[in-house]
Image (cartoon, rainbow, N blue to C red):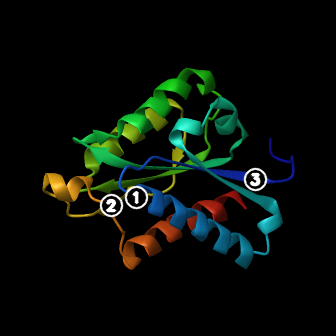
Amino acid sequence: MKPIDKKQLLVVWHSRTGAAQQMAQAAMKGAQTVATELESMDRLNIVVKQASQVDATDLLDADGFVFCAPENLASLSGAMKEFFDRNYYAVLDQLNGRPYAIMISAGSDGSGAARQAERICTGWRLRLIAPALIVNTDAQTPQAITAPKTITVDDSTACETLGGTLAALLL
């Protein structure tokens, strides 16, 4: 549970090959940087959790969210979808208006997963702060799709910017 005077940013992620996890870590770094620049690190609590570890209490305690996952077969990864399924009704009508961002790692497109996450978050009545950030890894073969990934410096910077933007909105 967070202290009353602090805002809490919850970064929820799932990753099989490392790209989405790196994106989540970059968003956290961006949020920390902005909080430090605003001399508000003592007013922002940043929680980064794997989707499988997040429960309704984590969501209710948060003032803003970053959801970060890979696209699998034109949809959210199963573990991220399971996170939304498991928590959806427990927090319905209790998160209204809270800001959020979506980050998707994809082999080529990512828009299907982004749309799916946006539809779920619309049901929670969250407020999208920017278009979904899609990091394209160009993985097109079975070997490339399942191989460990390293996102580019530019993609990491974009993730940091999105995390920082969300932090600035909370502060």
Residue at figure coordinates x 26%, y 64% from the top left: 137
119 vs 99, left or right, is left
Q: Which label belongs to residue 148?
A: 2
Query: Eyeballing the image, is 68 above or below 57?
Result: below
Q: Residue 133: where, in percent of width, then height? A: 39, 59
Q: Compute the Cα span from label 3 to label 1.
A: 28 Å
Q: Residue 60: where, in percent of width, then height? A: 69, 35
Quadrant of res 76: top left
| Element marked by disc 2 | loop
Asked whether the residues under the numbered discs 1 and 2 touch, taking CB atoms below 8 Å apart as contact, a structural biologist would say: yes
Q: Write down the residue under mark 3.
A: 7
Amino acid of disc 1: Gly
Q: Please tell me whether mark 3 or mark 2 is closer to you in this view.
A: 2
Q: Which label belongs to residue 134?
A: none
- Sequence-first disc among 1 and 2: 1
**In the rendered view of the protein, which quadrant contains the N terminus?**
top right
